């Protein structure tokens, strides 16, 4: 291993460092297989204060979004709420994907005019004392008509239960306070996951790009202030936990690539994959990459530890895939598709593999010569993904004016140029880290393909059903790394100033996004 | 490092200036509409690109956008042409991928109200469908697709900046934010402001500590 001291200031170190060297803040790297046992408390104490502050910023931001977004005006929030209600009140899972939610919840939604406001950007949420009194009447009626659970949970029904089980805690803690109080508690609980996401993004960048400490902070704060993270974590939605677990997976992989695969990291990686699979089906997209990472790390560790590294691989793989195997067995026993909705996503009943591949390519990138046009007149990279990331809030009905999307191209291009400069500058070091980069790329590719394959199921009736930037947020740690490299691309002298401007840019984006939502619902 | 402090100060100053400018602006308000709430009707639907024209319209002075009630899952590029006496007096275009029951197309404002105008809405379309919303009417006054009358008139809203600034509406907006909540009240807006301010202060301090 090539040990190298960590710079604590504006360093001119290469943008991409060799895979293994000194730890953060000048600490030596942990031993590979014989790391001393530390208590969880001791491990938490080793997390840098900056990571905690990034986490706190993310939690505050998501909590703010939980207040700015009107109740149930976030994608599928009524369905996710119904799932928690069912789990918390009956201990069972929802059984129907119909939108016939519980009477109690439907009364609250009626009182809030939820259906009239959803996807109707010209209609505001309730705005007068008369409507508030009407809502109170609905809430009183909801208490009278309260029934246990909600067997129907709409689109949430097909999701695994981990997030909903955790959300049962604030749901039950709110007692009989009514659905609006429960929802606010649940949203605030969800905001905690934004903190975990930002902290793990910081730690990922610390492990992956260790030479310039200041750039970790740029990554952590920018992620903490990413509006979409705040939106999704300030609502009841399993995406919030998915982002946190994905970020933790990236972090553990980066740590293992830098310090070697110990028993602890192998078990942690397996556990994270299992938790991810128990959180949201979308995590399936990251699994091939994570397993590839585990395999590469095991092969690498075998050179020094011998066959014991393969025992780690087996145990980690077992932990990772255990829940999925159990799920498959249960499905097979009950005559359902082996992997539920994932199996249906892999179903190619209405097209060839080639046409599906062509569709998935065009969903993200401009069409290549020889491909049929699946998105005529649409530049998907920009119109579906970039514009959506810049701002599409509420029930995907609250965009910025079109000129904002155009203006946003300027800072995006600047960040891309700085990142490219940094990347080119460090290209000589890339060769030593190709396997690690391939693992992250496989994770990203897996997610993109999953989203594309799912969207293809509804094509051509719907052009791009799942083309929503929020589905890409499990890759936030990679965005953090791009931002850190972009800041460093400005050079030794101007790097920290560029990093500061990047963070201010994200803060401004966040604040104006909140104002846009406020204008749409309350203006 | 001084450059970090300067960058932070410059960035935050720019942010505050942009906020003030935004708050001094006015929200778009409906200057004129023929929409009647609760009287919705689907007057046409199409799966191919077309142009719908509707006469007997009035373009109010200062109109900066026209809202046309088209419904689509991911709407196509839409262009609007307003003409009077056979002459185009305003036109605008909106890019594709909009959703919901209406599409808002920006226009250059005119200094005076023009009556007796014809509004033409055009869009290309492949595979997807667009539904036109409005109210049923006699064929004589209905919107047309070429020479063919639709089953009614398209709902069209004319939008222009209101007379009040966002700043003058702060109290009102804050009051609305407090409605429909777990514990209703005007506390919601100040609480949100405090949270975002705390996040900004923490982030700024961390930037100075770690980067400066």
Image (cartoon, rainbow, N blue to C red):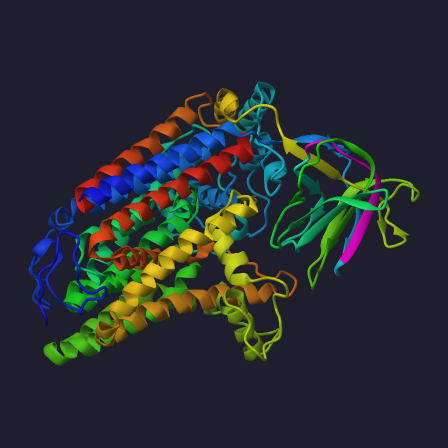
Q: Nearer the viewer, residue B85 or B161?
A: B85
Task: Determine if the magenta segment contains residue B56.
Answer: yes
Residue B165 in sight: yes
Residue A335 in sight: no
Where is B175 relative to A27, above or below? above
Q: How many marks?
A: 0
- What x and y, as percent, mark residue B191? 37, 27
Q: Nearer the viewer, residue A173 or B181?
A: B181
Q: Where, quadrant-wise, is the C terminus of chain B in this rendering?
A: top left
For this view, does A353 lie left or right of residue A57? Answer: right
For this view, does A173 lie left or right of residue B47? Answer: left
Taken as a whole, is the magenta stretch helix, strand or loop? Answer: strand
Q: Quadrant of residue A204?
A: bottom left
- What x and y, as percent, mark residue A226? 37, 47
Q: Nearer the viewer, residue B11 or A267?
A: B11
Task: Determine if the magenta segment contains residue A189.
Answer: no
- What x and y, as percent, mark residue B119? 78, 44
Q: Where, quadrant-wise, is the N terminus of chain B in this rendering?
A: top left
Q: Which region shows up in magenta?
A: B50-62
For this view, does B65 lie left or right of residue A75? Answer: right
Q: Residue at (49%, 57%) from the top-left corner?
A: A385
- What x and y, as percent, mark residue A132? 56, 22
Q: Nearer the viewer, residue A398 or A350?
A: A398
């Amino acid at each position: 291993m090539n040990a190298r001291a960590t710079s604590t200031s504006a360093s001119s170190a290469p943008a991409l460092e060799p895979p293994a060297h000194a730890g953060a803040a000048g600490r030596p790297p942990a031993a590979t297989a014989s790391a001393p046992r530390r208590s969880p408390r001791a491990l938490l104490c080793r997390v840098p204060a900056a990571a905690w502050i990034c986490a706190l910023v993310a939690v505050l931001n998501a909590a703010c979004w939980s207040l700015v977004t009107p109740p149930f005006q976030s994608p599928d929030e009524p369905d996710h709420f119904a799932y928690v209600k069912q789990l918390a009140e009956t201990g069972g899972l929802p059984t129907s994907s119909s939108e016939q939610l519980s009477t109690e919840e439907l009364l609250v939604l009626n009182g809030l005019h939820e259906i009239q406001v959803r996807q109707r950007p010209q209609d505001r949420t309730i705005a007068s004392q008369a409507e508030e009194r009407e809502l109170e009447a609905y809430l009183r009626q909801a208490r009278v008509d309260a029934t246990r659970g909600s067997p129907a949970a709409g689109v949430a029904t097909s999701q695994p239960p981990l997030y909903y089980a955790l959300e049962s805690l604030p749901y039950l803690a709110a007692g009989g306070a009514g659905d609006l109080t429960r929802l606010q508690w649940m949203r605030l609980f969800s905001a905690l996951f934004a903190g975990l996401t930002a902290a793990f993004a910081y730690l990922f960048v610390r492990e992956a790009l260790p030479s310039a400490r200041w750039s970790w902070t740029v990554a952590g704060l920018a992620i903490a202030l990413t509006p979409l993270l705040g939106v999704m974590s300030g609502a009841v939605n399993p995406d919030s936990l998915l982002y946190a677990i994905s970020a933790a997976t990236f972090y553990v992989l980066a740590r293992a690539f830098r310090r070697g695969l110990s028993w602890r990291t192998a078990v942690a990686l397996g556990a994270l994959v299992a938790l991810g699979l128990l959180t949201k089906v979308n995590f399936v997209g990251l699994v091939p990459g994570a397993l590839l990472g585990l395999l590469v790390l095991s092969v690498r560790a075998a050179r020094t530890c011998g066959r014991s590294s393969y025992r780690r691989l087996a145990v980690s793989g077992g932990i990772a895939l255990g829940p999925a195997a159990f799920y498959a067995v249960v499905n097979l026993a009950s005559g359902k598709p082996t992997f539920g909705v994932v199996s249906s996503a892999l179903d190619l009943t209405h097209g060839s593999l080639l046409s599906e591949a062509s569709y998935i390519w065009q969903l993200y990138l401009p069409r290549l010569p020889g491909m049929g046009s699946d998105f005529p007149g649409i530049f998907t990279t920009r119109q579906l993904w970039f514009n959506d990331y810049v701002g599409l809030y509420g029930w995907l009905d609250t965009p910025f004016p079109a000129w904002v999307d155009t203006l946003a191209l300027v800072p995006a291009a600047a960040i891309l140029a700085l990142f490219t400069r940094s990347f080119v500058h460090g290209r000589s070091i890339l060769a030593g880290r190709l396997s690690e980069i391939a693992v992250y790329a496989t994770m990203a590719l897996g997610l993109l393909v999953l989203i594309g394959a799912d969207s293809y199921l509804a094509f051509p009736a719907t052009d791009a059903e799942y083309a929503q930037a929020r589905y890409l947020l499990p890759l936030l740690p990679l965005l953090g790394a791009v931002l850190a490299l972009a800041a460093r691309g400005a050079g030794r002298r101007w790097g920290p100033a560029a990093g500061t401007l990047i963070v201010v840019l994200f803060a401004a984006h966040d604040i104006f996004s909140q104002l846009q939502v406020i204008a749409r619902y309350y203006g | 490092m001084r450059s970090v402090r300067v960058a932070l100060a410059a960035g935050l100053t720019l942010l505050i200036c942009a906020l003030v400018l935004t708050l001094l602006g006015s929200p778009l308000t409906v200057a004129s509409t023929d929409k009647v709430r609760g009287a919705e009707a689907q007057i046409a639907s199409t799966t191919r690109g077309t142009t719908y024209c509707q006469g007997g319209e009035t373009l109010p002075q200062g109109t900066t956008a026209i809202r046309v009630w088209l419904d689509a899952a991911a709407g196509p590029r839409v262009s609007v042409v307003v003409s009077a006496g056979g002459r185009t007096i305003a036109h605008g275009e909106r890019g594709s991928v909009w959703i919901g029951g209406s599409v808002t197309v920006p226009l250059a404002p005119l200094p005076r109200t023009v009556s007796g105008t014809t509004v033409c809405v055009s869009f290309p379309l492949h595979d997807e469908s667009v539904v036109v919303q409005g109210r049923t009417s006699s064929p004589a006054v209905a919107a047309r697709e070429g020479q063919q009358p639709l089953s009614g008139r398209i709902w069209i809203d004319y939008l222009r900046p209101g007379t009040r600034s966002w700043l003058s509406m702060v109290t009102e907006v804050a009051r609305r934010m407090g409605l429909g909540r777990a514990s209703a009240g005007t506390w919601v807006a100040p609480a949100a402001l405090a949270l975002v301010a705390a996040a900004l202060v923490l982030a700024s301090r961390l930037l100075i500590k770690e980067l400066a």
